[in-house]
Image (cartoon, rainbow, N blue to C red):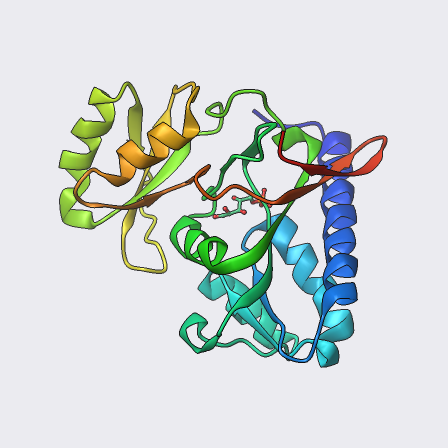
């Protein structure tokens, strides 16, 4: 559906505002060996721009996609391999949907696997989003699943058995060389259970539910101002 121009502009302003709030939050907590996890997508891109304003104070970052690494490097921000990081202090990233428990759907941009790895390592996971991403029940946004290419049909059939409608993201290849199946028409009442079941299908690399490791806090941009929420 095409959004009216004014609403898109409002949404971008909200994304910028939460990105700035997250950058301020990170800046206050930096220490000499901090490694900052940096997410992927339009909201994370604003965050990257704000990081550029205090680049000299940031010891290192880890990037959740090749695109994010490219953007960080273009601003002369140090990017290291996650294996070289003894820990990730704070990970900041956007989301496609969030529920009141800060369970998320992520991966609209296809970066879900590297995002999930960084989230698993990070001491603190801060999600940044505008209020259009808030839902009571996850699943209106198609849930991405990263799949090894030769397992595409098998995984598709297994997703149908779970009640989902898998749609191949035509022409898209992840940074890891895999494909994406987006699950449509699934109302996700138990995100942790579905996250586990999907990951048990042979050929699935991972799925875009972040419920077993949810966000620790959500910086939410609303028309009434910025709110910081923790899980219910
Ligand atoms: O793969 C992409 C990521 O999960 C993004 O965080 C997510 O799609 C949200 O992106 P945006 O900030 O552009 O809405």
Q: Give the percent coordinates (x, y) of residue 101.
A: 57, 30
Residue placed farthest to the right in the image?
Answer: 224
Tell me if residue 227 comes above or below residue 157 in the rendering: below
Q: Quadrant of the N terminus?
A: top right
In which quadrant of the rendered view does residue 136 lie? top right
Q: Is residue 181 left or right of residue 143?
A: left
Tell me if residue 54 comes above or below residue 105 in the rendering: below
Tell me if residue 187 comes above or below residue 232 in the rendering: above
Residue at the spot 44% in from the left edge and 75% down from the top edge:
81
Q: Give the percent coordinates (x, y) of residue 26.
A: 72, 62
Q: Give the percent coordinates (x, y) of residue 157.
A: 17, 28
Q: Quadrant of the C terminus?
A: top right
In which quadrant of the rendered view does residue 58 lie? bottom right
Q: Is residue 224 left or right of residue 209?
A: right
Q: Report how many numbered discs are placed on residues in the image.
A: 0
Tell me if residue 161 comes above or below residue 85 in the rendering: above
Residue at the spot 19% in from the left edge and 49% down from the top edge:
149
Q: Give the percent coordinates (x, y) of residue 140.
A: 49, 23
Q: Is residue 44 left or right of residue 117?
A: right
Residue at the spot 53% in from the left edge and 70% down from the top edge:
70
Ligand 1 is located in which of the four quadrants?
top right
């Amino acid at each position: 559906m095409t959004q009216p121009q004014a609403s898109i502009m409002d949404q971008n302003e909200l994304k910028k505002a939460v990105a700035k709030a997250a950058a301020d939050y990170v800046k206050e907590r930096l220490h000499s060996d901090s490694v900052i996890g940096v997410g992927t997508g339009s909201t994370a891109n604003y965050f990257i721009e704000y990081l550029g304003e205090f680049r000299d104070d940031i010891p290192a970052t880890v990037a959740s996609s090749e695109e994010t690494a490219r953007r960080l490097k273009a601003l002369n921000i140090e990017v290291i391999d996650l294996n070289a990081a003894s820990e990730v202090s704070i990970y900041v990233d956007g989301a496609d949907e969030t529920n009141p428990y800060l369970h998320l759907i992520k991966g609209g941009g296809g970066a879900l696997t590297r995002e999930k790895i960084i989230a698993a390592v990070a001491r603190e996971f801060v999600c940044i989003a505008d209020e259009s991403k808030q839902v009571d029940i996850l699943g209106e946004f198609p849930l991405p699943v990263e799949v090894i290419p030769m397992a595409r049909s098998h995984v598709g059939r297994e997703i149908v058995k779970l009640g989902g409608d898998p749609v191949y993201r035509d022409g898209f290849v992840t940074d890891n060389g895999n494909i994406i199946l987006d699950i449509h028409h699934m109302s996700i009442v138990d995100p942790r259970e579905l996250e586990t079941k999907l990951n048990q299908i042979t050929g699935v690399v991972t799925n875009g539910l972040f419920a077993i490791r949810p966000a620790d806090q959500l910086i939410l941009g609303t028309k009434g101002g910025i709110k910081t929420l923790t899980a219910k």
